[in-house]
Image (tube, rainbow, N blue to C red):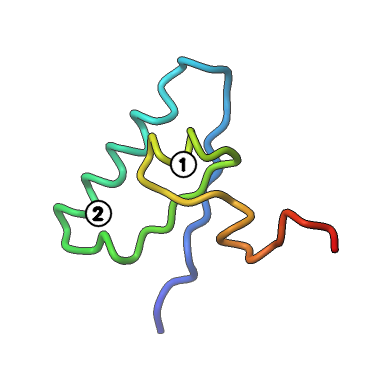
Amino acid sequence: NSPPPLHMLIHGEGRTGKSKVIQTITSYFAHKGAKYMLLKAAYTGVAASLIDGKMTHTIAMISQNEN
């Protein structure tokens, strides 16, 4: 049996170090050879690019158009 996936939500005011925490976690996964197991998402494109992730709606496959 494999353990259940770990879900983490990191939130807080701007400039409090959220991206640094995510970069540290990413480095740890890379060091362990498990970077492929890490999925990173952010609410905005700018935030996603800072963490080398994707926008939340893209990962959830939600369209921005309401049509």
Badge 1 marks a residue whose secondary structure is: helix
Where is residue 15? Give x, y as percent.
46, 15
Seen as rendered, the residue at the extreme bottom is 1
Count of numbered labels shown in the rendering: 2
**In terms of depth relative to the viewer, which is nearer, 56 or 9?**
56
**Label ID, residue 29:** 2
Q: Are marks 2 and 1 in contact (CB under 8 Å)?
A: no
Which residue is painted at 37% across and 58% down in the image? 38
Q: Label 2 to label 1, Cα distance in Å?
A: 18 Å
Where is residue 11? Give x, y as percent.
57, 31
For this view, does 11 lie left or right of residue 54?
Answer: right
Kind of residue indicated by mark 1: Ala
Residue 24 in which image quadrant: top left
**Label ID, residue 48:** 1
If you read the primary sequence from the N terminus, does the residue marked by circle 2 or circle 1 appear first?
2
Q: Quadrant of the N terminus?
A: bottom left
**In terms of depth relative to the viewer, which is nearer, 66 or 27?**
66
Where is residue 5? Give x, y as percent.
48, 66
59 up-or-down from 20: above or below: below
